[in-house]
Image (spheres, helix red, strand yellow):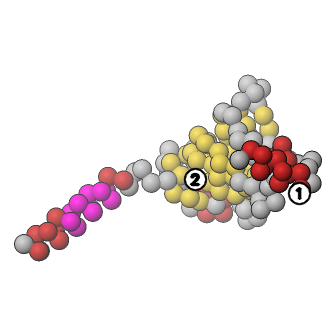
């Protein structure tokens, strides 16, 4: 009875892993994606820094073209949509999307990252005492 239970449990685990294999979104940095690109159309995540001077807005006003780099390699990225407010040149980004055969990464979603010195725009011009007072008033 124990052997049958273990076999059923192992079978269920294998079945779940097989069913989820196409749903996994792998994470790449630019040097990995250039050295060993995923097949076109496969959902992946690309993480790195938005290179300064690379951000361009297309004529439609919602399509962004930029380059993500890691110091070793560069990957051109195309994104159509509203970018997060923290998305700027020189900042970290994780782009979710797919590689095209021409080597361009087409992002469906952007996740902007900030450093440990992040301060909300509303608190930028305040000293620490004023910022604490505003924060305590909103609680």
Instruction: Choose between 41 and 131: the one closer to the eye.
Output: 131
Instruction: Choose between 66 and 37: the one closer to the eye.
Output: 66
Q: Is residue 15 magenta?
A: yes
Residue 131 in the image: state x and y as whole percent. Answer: 85, 51
Res 10 quadrant in image: bottom left
The quarter of the picture where the N terminus appears is bottom left
- Residue 28 at least partly seen: yes
Res 122 quadrant in image: top right
The dot on residue 128 is 1
Instruction: Choose between 45 and 13: the one closer to the eye.
Output: 13
Q: Is the stretch drawn in magenta largely helix, strand or loop?
A: helix
User: Residue sitting at 71 percent across and 30 percent down?
Assistant: 62
User: Residue sitting at 56 percent across and 58 percent down?
Assistant: 27
Q: Earlier in the sequence, mark 2 or mark 1?
A: 2
The dot on residue 106 is none
**Helix, strand or loop for disc 1:** helix
Which residue is the extreme one toward the bottom?
A: 2
Could you tell whether 66 is left or right of 17 in the image?
A: right
Which residue is the extreme one toward the left?
A: 1
Mark closer to the observer (2, 1) = 1
Determine the CA span between mark 2 and mark 1: 37 Å
Near mark 1 (Cα within 10 A), the count class, few <14, some 14-19 or many ≥20, is few
Q: Is the residue under label 1 in contact with that under label 2 (CB below 8 Å)?
A: no
Residue 63 in the image: state x and y as whole percent. Answer: 71, 33
Could you tell whether 102 is left or right of 67 in the image?
A: left
Could you tell whether 41 is left or right of 52 in the image?
A: left
Residue 103 in the image: state x and y as whole percent. Answer: 63, 48
Res 92 quadrant in image: bottom right
User: Residue sitting at 77 percent across and 59 percent down?
Assistant: 115
**Residue occupied by mark 2:** 45
State the extent of the magenta-drawn residues as a range: 9-18
Q: Is residue 69 magenta?
A: no
């Amino acid at each position: 009875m124990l052997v049958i239970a273990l076999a059923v449990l192992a079978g269920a685990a294998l079945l779940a892993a097989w069913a989820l294999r196409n749903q996994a979104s792998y994470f790449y940095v630019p040097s990995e994606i250039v050295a060993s690109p995923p097949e076109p159309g496969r959902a992946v995540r690309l993480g790195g820094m938005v290179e300064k001077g690379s951000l361009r807005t297309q004529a439609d006003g919602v399509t962004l073209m930029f380059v993500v780099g890691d110091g070793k390699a560069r990957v051109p990225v195309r994104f159509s949509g509203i970018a997060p407010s923290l998305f700027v040149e020189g900042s970290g980004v994780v782009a979710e999307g797919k590689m095209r055969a021409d080597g361009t990464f087409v992002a469906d979603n952007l996740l902007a990252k900030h450093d440990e010195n992040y301060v909300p725009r509303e608190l930028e011009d305040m000293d620490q005492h004023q910022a604490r007072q505003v924060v305590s008033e909103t609680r």
